[in-house]
Image (cartoon, grey):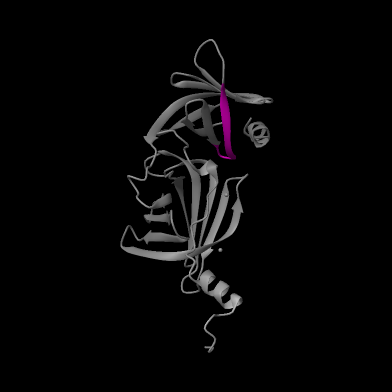
Amino acid sequence: MRHLLTLSLAALLVSGCAATPAPTQATDHGASNRKATAPLLPSALFAGEAETFEGWRCEPASQHLVTAFNDETLRLWSLHGAWRLPQAVVANGARYQDGAISFWNRGDKAQVETPRGQLQCQRAISREALSREDHPGVMLFGRGNEPGWSVALSSSTPTLTLTTDYGEQTQTLPYMVSVMDNDAGRVVLENADAERFFRVRIEAGACFDSMSGKPFPARVTLSLDGEQYSGCGQGIAP
């Protein structure tokens, strides 16, 4: 069933003497004074207007899903990606559907349907979505455990704040985007200078904190000093 669900769900963001300088000089001068801005990230990394993320445990394929309910849209994340399902009319409960994929929610239970199979799901855990009040000036926040680390992407400039060793070390570093796949919800960031190599890979998909079990809409992988660390993350809307 895991294989079948994967297949079906898969079917679902750079001195002269003249009084007047030459035009090329003026253009270059203006470009050098422009401040680099942070890139726009894929929408699949965000909760939209939802204030809560919910984690679901599903059988018989032992799938774990994450959802965020907006007014008329459901954002759904599985281990294999992310989808938006608009609300459909049903007699009871709340049903969200996009083509052959649907999520029918009735209280703490839900039924996920695909052309090749069906999942019965139970709501297991929820958490409030991170906000700019929690993390001012941050566009995306990711973290992991053992050893504790976190990465916070600035919402204004292409820089990130990297905290390692359970908060003992903190650095703010410039990055460049090496991969930006909006359709897949995948971003890869790398250091913009050679002082310390790092890579941050962000992928839309159901993620659960390894200690608390709380749900997130993105998996975050940090490569640093020859080591690789895994954790979860969330885009934070303005």
Q: Is residue 9 above or below residue 140?
A: above
Residue 82 forms part of the magenta stretch: yes
Q: Residue at x 47, y 20 (%)?
A: 109
Percent x, y of residue 89: 57, 15
Residue 105: x, y in percent?
A: 50, 20
Name the residue: 58% across, 40% down: 81
Direction from residue 52 to residue 176 in the image, left or right: right
From the viewer's perspective, tell me whether residue 59 is left or right of residue 128. Answer: right
**Quadrant location of the C terminus?**
top left
Query: Is 123 part of what is drawn in magenta?
Result: no
The picture places residue 67, in percent across and down from the top left corner, at: 49, 32
| Range drawn in magenta | 78-87
> Is any atom of residue 81 visible in this view?
yes
The furthest residue to the left: 168
Q: Main secondary structure of the magenta part?
A: strand
* Residue furthest to the top: 91
The residue sitting at 38% across, 42% down in the picture is: 130
